[in-house]
Amino acid sequence: MGRILAFIYGVVSYGMFLGAFGYAIAFVGDFWVPKTINSGEPGAFLPALLINAGLLSLFAVQHSGMARPGFKKWWTKIVPEPIERSTYVLLASGVLFLLYWQWQPLPAPIWSVENEIGRWILWGLFGLGWGLVVYTTFLISHAHLFGLTQVRDFMKDRDLWEPKFQTPNLYSHMRHPMMLGFFFAFWAIPEMTVGHLVFSIATTGYILVALQLEERDLIQAFGDRYRKYRKEVPMFIPRAGQKSTVDSKEQNTELLSQPFDE
Ligand SMILES: C[S@@+](CC[C@H](N)C(=O)[O-])C[C@H]1O[C@@H](n2cnc3c(N)ncnc32)[C@H](O)[C@@H]1O
């Protein structure tokens, strides 16, 4: 019974993520949904800025803090390991909904692209960015990233599957294609407002810091193979004719068996 409930919990958390992710596209793009990054009655500048900074900080602390091995080691004493990722996904989605709800608009324009072709190019890059984010989740493991593999394995009474070091497809040319997608999604905007600029600068800064933490954990888990990959493959901008020579099939099993050790 507990295993079925855990599975249902995982699926519900995943549904919340889908809602939060879909809403993010319209929120950032300023279309379709009732509350967007620029909609609502603007208030005083400083309080609005502080509220937005608080919302973004809450997201950053939850998102990066709860992803650290040290935190997981402690957290899984309270939350059972099979639903740890689903709980992370659920809380991240909840924080995102709070951000959409409480975000304060700062609608003063920074730039406005009037040229029709220029606008289409920017919207194209915006769409490409979100598409890249979705696509890359499937390259490593979509189901594991959002906790579905874990609850399925638990329901079927199997050992929990851990993702291995991988360099498939785009990952053999750049280390962080998903974050590159977010950069396009956050910056390729024909009508840039002060509020949107605050959002784009803060999220870009956050991603650059969060990636340092992620890579530290990847080195901890995969050792020299990740170090070599890091030397060969740039973070975002691929080098012509160059790709990773690290064999991601050859697994570093002794390190992977202790993913929570720091
Ligand atoms: C949200 S994904 C982002 C991946 C990457 N930073 C990107 O921008 O494409 C984060 C998860 O991917 C995992 N990850 C990142 N690169 C990986 C790789 N080459 N092989 C396996 N897992 C990886 C991290 O350990 C983390 O659990």
Image: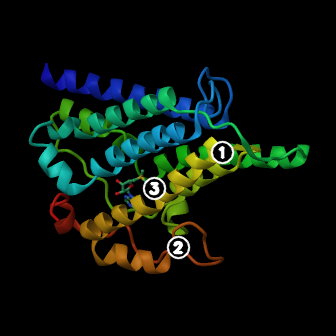
Q: Earlier in the sequence, mark 3 or mark 2?
A: 3
**How far is disc 3 from disc 2 in space, using C-alphas?**
19 Å
Q: Nearer the viewer, residue 254 or 219?
A: 219
Q: In which quarter of the image is the N terminus?
A: top left
Q: Residue at x 51, y 52 (%)?
A: 202
**How far is disc 1 from disc 2 in space, using C-alphas?**
31 Å
Q: Which residue is drawn at 47% across and 52% down?
A: 139
In the image, residue 116 above or below residue 227 = above
Q: Quadrant of the C terminus?
A: bottom left
Tell me if the residue at label 3 has its CB under 8 Å from ligand 1: no
Q: Which residue carries the number 3 mark?
A: 206
Q: Which of 111 and 261 is in front in this view?
A: 111
Q: Which percent across, then down, holds residue 148?
A: 32, 35
> What amino acid is found at the position of numbered circle 3 in the picture?
Tyr
Q: Earlier in the sequence, mark 3 or mark 1?
A: 1
> What amino acid is found at the position of numbered circle 2 in the picture?
Pro
Q: Which of marks 1 and 2 is in front?
A: 1
Q: Which percent across, then down, holds residue 52?
A: 49, 40
> What amino acid is found at the position of numbered circle 1 in the picture?
Val
Q: Which residue carries the number 2 mark?
A: 234
Q: Which residue is drawn at 67% across and 32% down?
A: 30
Q: Which residue lies furthest to the left in this view?
A: 77
Q: How crowded is mark 1: few (under 14 residues within 10 Å), some or many (20 or more)?
A: some
Q: Which residue is drawn at 15% across and 44% down?
A: 75
